[in-house]
Image (tube, coloured by chain):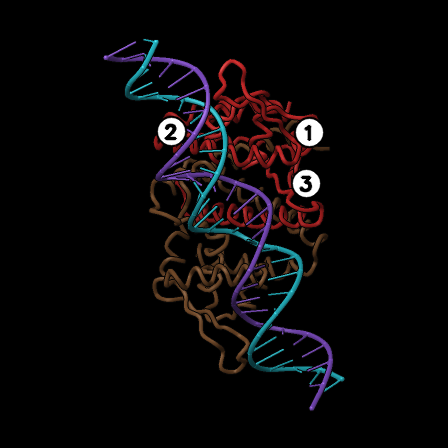
Chain colours: A red, B brown, C purple, D cyan
Amino acid sequence: MPNLVKQKNAAGKLIEFNMVKHTVDELSHRTHAAKGEHQSLFQGQGKILLALSQNDGLSQKELATRLDLTAQSTAEFVNKLVKKHLVTKEKSTTDRRKTIIRLTDAGRKSATKEAAKVPEFLKGLTDTELDQLTKILTKMNDSLYDEINTANPSLVNKFRDSVTDRLRDWFL
Amino acid sequence: MPNLVKQKNAAGKLIEFNMVKHTVDELSHRTHAAKGEHQSLFQGQGKILLALSQNDGLSQKELATRLDLTAQSTAEFVNKLVKKHLVTKEKSTTDRRKTIIRLTDAGRKSATKEAAKVPEFLKGLTDTELDQLTKILTKMNDSLYDEINTANPSLVNKFRDSVTDRLRDWFL
DNA sequence: ATTTTTAATCAGGGGCCCTGATTAAAAGAA
DNA sequence: TTCTTTTAATCAGGGCCCCTGATTAAAAAT
């Protein structure tokens, strides 16, 4: 039987981690970035860039389903990226309803630059701790996948694959 | 000398954790909440509620500095909470520039209800793993505090205190 | 008494996301 | 081949998180 106090300790630390991490992220982009340079890689425009760097030339609809976004949200982010010259839009010739989205050179660079970087706060951990953390996170992730699965079975396969696809590219 | 591969493994798992956690959160609030019921406790309106449950009757300015928000953002969130009858605004009698914010009963209830709950994905961990995770997160958090400290020394004391204050209340 | 600082507000904007209604093109049915 | 339905994308509008800039009212400082 698990120890509730230990669970609460870990939960508290995890909450603290999220809060502190959040402010560190804000701090860094407030100083570094000029304006509107958020792109957290896992949301909005960043998500699109990442999906395209994984698989360029997707249609908006394909992007939407892969990223679990509505077609409207996808359109919004794509249009913003077009304005920033990070992607291009072109009508499909085989199916004129479709719009094909492609990364520009700048877009490709922007998508890959921030990735594959080991965060500072991991560098202070020993090898043993890294192994422990990896193992623990694997368990936690599996548990979360289970939650997704029970709530929305159709989502989990698509999602899990896309996650592992992206991670493979960044970290190997 | 730390093993880069181990670091990357952990980093990957952590990124995966964030992504999966993110979609689980979305999933749960999409099904559970009626409309506009985000309140993630660490952002926006939730932040305000939390700060007030820790220390009721603060002025807007005090809220803003404690939560590291601008006065305008603070005003926005407070006004939204007033509309939801979760807090009240009243002019200070001693300094008529100031507006004192107080939790209503509903606000206090709303602030404390979601907290202090151990997330599902921690329940599958053994006591040993929980201890390991707590220790590792402590190190990671310390590292993040260091980052904040070097970037903005004035922020760290205020922030760290407020975090530990809040966590103490939720988890003890 | 006048200037300066402070607390709050209004106006406006950017980012992330959604629902609803509409258009244009493709695919299916009569 | 028409007629209908489905599909891909768009426009309009909304909610949430947050910021900068300009302005007002009141307190503090000179």
Distance of mark 1 from mark 3, alpha carbons?
12 Å
Disc 3 crowd, CA 10 A, few/some/many (<14, 14-19, 20+): few
Badge 3 marks a residue whose secondary structure is helix
Distance of mark 2 from mark 1, alpha carbons?
33 Å
Q: Is residue A81 above or below residue D2?
A: below
Residue indicated by mark 3 = A120
Q: Which mark is residue B4?
A: 1
What's the residue type where badge 3 is placed?
Answer: Glu
Badge 1 marks a residue whose secondary structure is helix
Residue indicated by mark 2 = A149
State the image quarter where residue A130 is shown. Answer: top right
Distance of mark 2 from mark 3, alpha carbons?
33 Å
Chain of residue at mark 2:
A
Residue B118 versus residue A109: which sits nearer the camera?
A109
State the image quarter where residue A155 is shown. Answer: top left
Image spot of residue B56 (x, y percent): 46, 69
